[in-house]
Image (cartoon, helix red, strand yellow):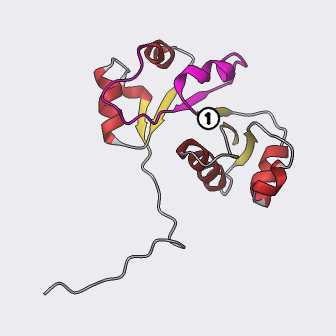
Amino acid sequence: MNIKIIGDVMGQTGYSSHTKQLSLALSKHASVQLESQKYPGWELKCKEEIIDMLNCKQENDVSIFIGTPDYWAFELANKPKKFIGWYIFECANSPIHWIDIMLDERVDQIWTPSNFNRDVLLKEGIPKEKIFVIPHGIDTKYFFPTRVKIK
């Protein structure tokens, strides 16, 4: 399977972190083309694997957009075979102009990291068949809790 991931990999935001980590994880199981804004010296900020994905050119089976729904239209205009939007917004309501975009028939799936986000989307009328909860992972190189006996 060939996957195109669109999102920021140069910044320090949560979206940037999601884009980098999801790209690296999926590249272990599929061919990944990564699309991100670049600026002079961008190569110095990226791991070699990320650089390879940014330089990859391929026909893709699915596009995954990691960013707010108001930007999904940029990729939807390219008429991808399948489109997945990554929704992260920790508020009780989405901005009203996002809802029409998420309901667009060209949006095949919406991935979100929490049950809270799923419940917000359901409340706003997004069909449950479109919503998939993909929890955040943990990098065990940096997080490794020790077992402590509780007395």
Whether residue 103 appears in this view of the structure is yes
The stretch drawn in magenta includes residue 118: no
Q: Which residue is found at the position 31% from the left and 25% from the top?
A: 122
State the image coordinates of residue 62 (x, y, percent, origin top left).
65, 33
Query: In the rendered image of this protein, does residue 2 appear above or below residue 25?
Result: above
The stretch drawn in magenta includes residue 75: yes
Look at mark 1 in the image and give the residue it sits on: 64
Q: Which residue is found at the position 83% from the left and 52% from the top?
A: 43
* Quadrant the C terminus occupies: bottom left
State the image coordinates of residue 35 (x, y, percent, origin top left).
74, 37
Query: In the rendered image of this protein, does residue 8 appear above or below residue 98?
Result: below
Give the tally of numbered discs. 1
Is 36 on the left-hand or right-hand side of 115?
Answer: right
Whether residue 107 appears in this view of the structure is no
Label 1 Cα neighbours within 10 Å, binned few <14 / some 14-19 / many ≥20 = many
Q: Nearer the viewer, residue 55 or 61?
A: 55
Q: Nearer the viewer, residue 123 or 131?
A: 123
State the image coordinates of residue 64 (x, y, percent, origin top left).
61, 35
Q: Which residue is found at the position 51% from the left and 16% from the top?
A: 101
State the image coordinates of residue 25 (x, y, percent, origin top left).
61, 55
Q: Which residues are magenta?
A: 67-96
For badge 1, the amino acid type reads: Ile
SS for callout 1: strand
Residue extending farthest left: 151
* Quadrant the N terminus occupies: top right
Is 121 on the left-hand or right-hand side of 66?
Answer: left
Query: In the rendered image of this protein, does residue 70 appear above or below residue 49?
Result: above
Is 42 on the left-hand or right-hand side of 120?
Answer: right
